[in-house]
Image (cartoon, grey):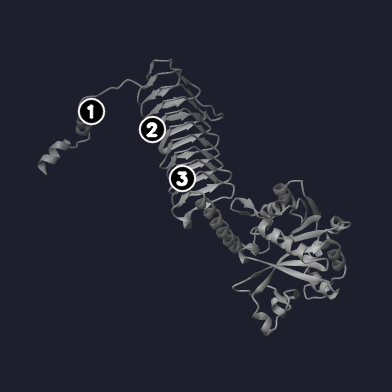
């Protein structure tokens, strides 16, 4: 059977109160419209057309040019939107899936089930409506069926009788139509209502009036949720996140507090990894096996090797090897490649640098735009001075270098293999291998300087130990 899809994505985001199209807002790291497109592809529907408005550029940036687009210059209802796709539908045989573009929860499973209902309903079936039972159906159109389960009509909430208001099966605004019959019905709907709009639901009544059968495929209510404002966006985010967390937990990942853990849809995590409270994993992040991530860490578009611990830290667009210790309060900025068995400790920042195996920067250090070898020791307070006011350039620190605390390594020096840097040095020239670099002024002690200063001021100077003895 030939299957195509029409997706209505021309909404103005009025209730979102956003300058962006509502369908490009993200749910679990993916634009809403991309969730819809992926569900269609997974259900076997590759031929898709999107009804768009003057915000179409944002949608095109999400979906690319492998799908078709039709501009709806004036928004006059859902039926009017689908009318714009008539040139795309004409001459086609088979079925067309019609979806709103703001329904990120729709799944390929739901679409496949609906297509199966459509095929099994027979030649006299003109359409299938995707429906769901709602705990609170207020505001939704109700599905009225006959004794055989066929749909008799869709009744909007404001038009329901007392008996119809008791119905809990609602219209999801997702449909499958026989393509030729949809085109016929679209040509006969009118805009005789207070809003002066063309409603797609009117086609259902027309098709039933023509003697055709309309079936329904019931799914879980959560799969039908749309996004019209930021409240609904948050609700959908929470449901999607719960599903993602459950998937990882069933695959052997220990998530100690699902209520405070957020994981995007494309994240991969190895089994026996523990995710601690307050952790956010974003983008196409890959976490290895036997890791500990968190508490309160954020990792975005990065790769973390097996056995690594990331504690109270941020990692962005970087690679970290196996058995590393990151944090607490470390910041791994973009374009870092950190090898195996590395320690990046408390209040250490690394930016656009490579760091070799077994290197240690345990606290209060900045490594920027630098190439760091194996088994390097950064003393507390070490800074690679990578910015001269105009350009950024890093240092080269070769294997087995020992850097004493409170040292400044000025770009673009080279610290040779097995060299030492004396604590408190500012290094402005290359240090050869096996050498000691000292870049500090000679210490001078001035005896009795404090007491002499006090005498000139007319102060009585008492030594600290004398005060203690008096107490």
| Quarter of the rendering occupied by the C terminus | top left
**Secondary structure type for disc 3:** loop
Does the rendering let one see residue 107?
Answer: no
Q: Earlier in the sequence, mark 2 or mark 1?
A: 2
31 with respect to 87 (left or right): left
- Residue picked out by circle 1: 449
For the residue pair 316 and 413, the one nearer the viewer reads as 316
Depth order, front residue of 380/2: 2
Of callouts 2 and 3, the N-terminal one:
3
Q: Nearer the viewer, residue 316 or 365?
A: 316
The residue under the point 71% across, 47% down is 61
Residue annotated with mark 2: 381
**Quarter containing the N terminus:** bottom right
Q: Which residue is mark 3?
A: 273
In the figure, 157 relative to 88: above or below? below
Circle 1 sits in a helix, a strand or a loop, which is it?
A: helix
Q: Are marks 3 and 1 in contact (CB under 8 Å)?
A: no
Mark 1, Cα crowd under 10 Å, few <14 / some 14-19 / many 20+, is few
Residue 208's place in the image compared with 388, above or below, is below
Q: Residue 300 appears in which quarter of the rendering?
A: top right
Across and down, in percent, residue 202 comes to 80, 72
Residue 39 point in image, percent of width and height: 68, 54
Q: Name which quarter of the figure residue 467 lies in.
A: top left
What's the distance in space between the residues labelled 2 and 1, CA to CA?
29 Å
Kindly identify the residue that appears in the image at 51 percent across and 30 percent down: 353
**Residue displayed at 66% across by 73% down:** 169
In the rendered image, the vertical position of residue 37 relative to residue 170, given as above or below: above
**Residue 110 found in image quarter:** bottom right
Q: Position of residue 27 (x, y in %)?
A: 61, 55
Cα–Cα span, label 2 and label 3: 32 Å
């Amino acid at each position: 059977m030939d299957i195509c899809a029409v997706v209505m994505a021309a909404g103005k985001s009025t209730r979102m109160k956003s300058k962006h199209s509502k369908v490009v807002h993200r749910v679990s790291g993916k634009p809403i419209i991309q969730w819809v497109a992926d569900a269609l592809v997974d259900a076997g529907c590759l031929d898709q057309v999107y009804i768009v408005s003057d915000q179409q550029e944002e949608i095109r940036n999400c979906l690319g040019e492998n799908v078709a687009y039709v501009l709806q210059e004036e928004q006059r209802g859902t039926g009017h939107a689908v009318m714009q796709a008539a040139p795309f539908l004409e001459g086609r045989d088979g079925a067309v899936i019609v979806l709103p573009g703001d329904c990120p929860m729709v799944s390929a499973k739901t679409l496949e089930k609906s297509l199966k209902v459509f095929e099994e309903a027979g030649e006299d079936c003109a359409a299938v409506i995707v429906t769901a039972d709602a705990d609170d159906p207020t505001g939704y159109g109700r599905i009225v069926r006959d004794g055989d389960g066929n749909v008799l009509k869709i009744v909007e909430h404001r038009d329901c009788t007392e008996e119809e208001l008791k119905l809990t099966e609602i219209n999801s605004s997702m449909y499958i139509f026989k393509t030729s019959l949809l085109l016929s019905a679209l040509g006969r709907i009118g805009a005789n209502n207070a809003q002066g709009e063309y409603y797609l639901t009117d086609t259902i009544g027309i098709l039933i009036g023509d003697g055709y059968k309309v079936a329904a495929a019931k799914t879980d209510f959560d799969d039908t949720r749309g996004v019209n404002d930021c409240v609904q966006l948050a609700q959908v985010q929470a449901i999607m996140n719960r599903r993602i967390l459950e998937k990882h937990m069933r695959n052997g990942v220990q998530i100690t507090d699902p209520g405070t853990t957020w994981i995007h849809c494309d994240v991969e995590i190895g089994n026996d990894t523990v995710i601690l409270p307050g952790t956010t994993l974003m983008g196409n992040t890959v976490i290895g096996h036997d890791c500990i991530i968190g508490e309160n860490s954020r990792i975005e578009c990065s790769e973390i090797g097996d056995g690594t611990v990331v504690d109270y830290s941020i990692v962005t667009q970087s690679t970290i090897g196996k058995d590393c210790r990151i944090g607490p309060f470390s910041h791994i900025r973009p374009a870092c490649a950190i090898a195996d068995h590395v320690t990046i400790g408390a209040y250490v920042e690394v930016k656009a640098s490579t760091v070799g195996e077994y290197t240690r920067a345990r606290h209060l250090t900045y490594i920027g735009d630098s190439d760091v070898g194996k088994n390097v020791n950064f003393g507390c307070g070490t800074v690679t001075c990578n910015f001269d006011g105009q350009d950024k350039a890093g240092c080269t620190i070769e294997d087995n270098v020992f850097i004493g605390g409170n040292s400044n390594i000025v770009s673009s020096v080279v610290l040779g293999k097995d060299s030492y840097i004396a604590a408190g040095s500012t290094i402005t020239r290359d240090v050869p291998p096996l050498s000691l670099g000292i870049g500090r002024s000679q210490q001078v002690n001035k005896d009795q300087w404090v007491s002499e200063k006090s005498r000139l001021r007319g102060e009585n100077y008492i030594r600290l130990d004398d005060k203690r003895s008096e107490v």
